[in-house]
Each structure stands twice: as C-alpha cells, then as structure tokens.
Amino acid sequence: MLHDFKNDVFDIIIQGGQSNSEGCGIGPLEHPFQPNAEIYMMENDFTIMTAREKVWGNDAVGNYAFSFAEKYVINGNLKPDRKLLILLAAVGGTSFHARRWGLEDDLFLIMINMLETALNLNPENRPVALLWHQGESDTQNPVYDTHYNNLSKLVNKVRSVAGSDDLPFIAGNFVPQWYNENIDICIPIVKAIRDVCADIGHAAFIESDGLQSNNEKVGNDDKIHFSREALHFLGHRYYNAYDGIIYDV
C-alpha cells in the first residue's frame, strides 16, 4: 500500500546544485548513514521514500544532506510529531552557463515544483534550509558578475516560493585538490558564491579545507568530487553554519 504523506508533517530541506550536491563520494565511512523513520527524501521524479545512500556498482555513495539531517535531528531541531524531508534536486554536471539553473531553466523549475509539491502535502510543512553546492561547471565560463547575479536571483526566488525571506542559505567551496589545480578559473566563481553568502543575509559559505577527493581517498583519479567520508564531514560543517544562522537573529 502506498503511504499517504499528506498525514505527515515535514520540515523541508532543499538541496540543489551539481554532482557534489547530488552526491558522488565513494570510499569507507566509519559511521554510514542509517535509514530511519524520521528522515525522508524526495527524488526529482517526486517519489518520496525513506532517505538512504545510493549505490553505484559495489560502492555506496555519500550525500552531505544526510549527515546534515542527522545533526538536525540529534540536536533537537526536529520537533515531536514532525519528520524531515530532503528535496534531492541536484543534478551532476549542470550549470547556469548551460541554462539549467536560471529562473526559467529546467532544473530550477523542477526544484521549485518539488518545493511546491512538498508544501502542498500538508499546510503545516515548512522549509528550513536551502543547501547548495555548485559552480564547478561554471568555471568553464568564469565571470564573477554573471555567477553572482544568477545565484542571488536563485536564492531570492526560492525564498519567495518558500514564503520565508530569511530561509537559511548555505553553500560550500570546491574540493581542495581540484580547486588548487584549477585555481585561476575557480577564483571568480568561488568569490561570487562567497559574496552572495555575505551579502544576501541569513547565509553562510562553508570552507572545504582538509576534505579529500575520491582520488585522494581511493586512488581513482576523480579529483573533482568529495569522497564519501568528506561529504559526511561537509554535512556537519553545513549544519554548524545553519545552527549559527538560526541562533544569530
């Protein structure tokens, strides 16, 4: 029998961006995410299910929203009789430049449709955070002003649809190994993301220092993606920033 999610009350986490937000991290993890009855996810086909790591071949693949969600629950942000719903709107290899995340572009509109769908399930559902990791693909067109304006518009529109001008927005830096090997094209995009977080209010930019790539963890030449372990700790950094935003009001 299909579960009727209209009878559940959700705090909603919106997760957008490209592959490091979609989750491409492999390798060992000491304390992997355990599916439970409090944390759910919505795929971009609008399917809702218990949150769980995806599998590529023989590898489990990490997602920083899951360790964020665990901290959200453990630290008491999730009130009794509520559940947590993560909207998995990120898609690997996507950019503003290729017209995927602009306000009239397909992935942005799907993300907004996912949010509206989640809100319409129950009038007591509420968005609590917009988690974003994106920009690697836009380094192929590294124009500061363009990326700053695109990202600012995205955050403002999501906040408008969410009905919350102060919806926390959190974004993060690239994998250090890949960033350092491509620093000239990364600097304008990362500066734009950092500045949006500084200017837009109720936002934070997360540094990625010390977090390993898949290549560094398992030796597979994949330098652009955080390892599974790195994504776990990245989620903790996102949560700590979120905690700082909600209590600094």
Image: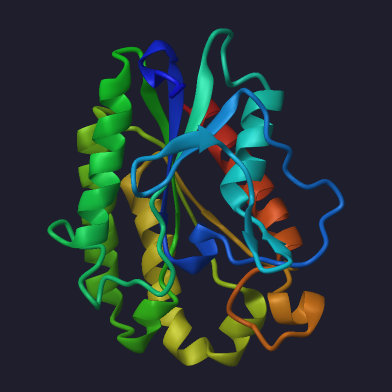
Q: Residue furthest top?
A: 81
Q: Is residue 172 visible?
A: no
- Name the quadrant containing residue 51: top right
Residue 192 drawn at (x, y percent): 36, 68
In which quarter of the view is residue 17 placed? bottom left
Q: How many marks?
A: 0
Residue shown at 54%/8% (left/top)? 81
Which of the 4 image quarters holds residue 130?
top left
Above or below, comparing residue 108 to residue 12 in the picture: below
> Percent position (x, y) of residue 178?
60, 83
- Horizontal and vertical percent for residue 177? 66, 82
Q: Residue at x 78, y 84 (%)?
A: 219
In the image, 198 versus 159, the foreground residue is 159
Horizontal side, residue 102 vs residue 151: left or right? left
Residue 158 vertical position relative to residue 120 in the rendered view, above or below = below
Color encoding of the figure: rainbow
In the rendering, at what x and y percent does residue 170 appear? Answer: 47, 48
In this view, the residue farthest toward the left is: 104
